[in-house]
Image: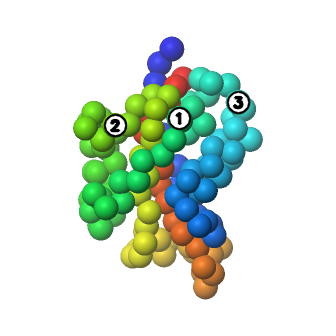
């Protein structure tokens, strides 16, 4: 079987990155089923926090994600770990808060990315 890349954004009142990751996995299974080759985050085995390595600008983050998915030094792999960046502030988090109805509410925003089995 093959692999495909994925990008998933999650926003909510999460205490940890792992809690947000588990929510993203549950949502993927609910939407696409539990097939081990469904091409979603649910085919990964965990999450690696890359927030401290990521640039702050939206364009920089996009480029960083593309590079980290394709560069083995980050340790992201099919059936292995996916990467995660937390948006702690700025335009990206503000846009996510508005889109998902979290304006004025306590929340954390993340993007998960990596390789999924398909």
Alpha carbon distance from label 2 to label 1: 12 Å
Q: Earlier in the sequence, mark 2 or mark 3?
A: 3
Residue in the image at 40% along x and 31% along y: 77
Left or right, 114 with reference to 101 = left
Q: Earlier in the sequence, mark 3 or mark 1?
A: 3
Residue at the image position 63 percent from the left and 81 percent from the top: 105
Q: Which residue is mark 3?
A: 34
Instruction: Check disc 2: other Cα within 10 Å, few if <14, some if 14-19, many if 20+.
Output: some
The Cα–Cα distance between marks 3 and 1, rounded to whole angstroms, is 12 Å
Q: Position of residue 108 (x, y in %)?
A: 54, 69
* Residue under the image location 62 percent in, 24 percent down: 36
- Say which of 8 and 14 sits in front: 14
Pointer 3: residues within 10 angstroms few (<14), some, or many (20+)? some
Q: Position of residue 27 (x, y in %)?
A: 68, 47
Q: Is residue 93 above or below residue 37?
A: below
Quarter of the C terminus within the rendering: top right
Q: Label 1, on which residue?
A: 44
Q: Mark 2 sits on what residue? A: 75
């Amino acid at each position: 079987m093959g692999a495909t890349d994925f990008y998933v954004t999650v926003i909510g009142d999460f205490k940890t990155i792992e809690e947000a990751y588990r929510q993203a996995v549950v949502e993927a299974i609910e939407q696409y089923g539990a097939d081990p080759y469904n091409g979603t985050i649910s085919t990964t085995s965990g999450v690696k926090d890359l927030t401290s390595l990521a640039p702050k600008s939206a364009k920089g983050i996009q480029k960083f994600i593309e590079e980290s998915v394709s560069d083995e030094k980050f340790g992201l792999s099919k059936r292995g770990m996916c990467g995660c960046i937390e948006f702690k502030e700025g335009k990206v988090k503000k846009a996510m808060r508005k889109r998902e109805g979290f304006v004025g509410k306590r929340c954390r925003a993340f993007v998960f990315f990596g390789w999924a089995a398909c």
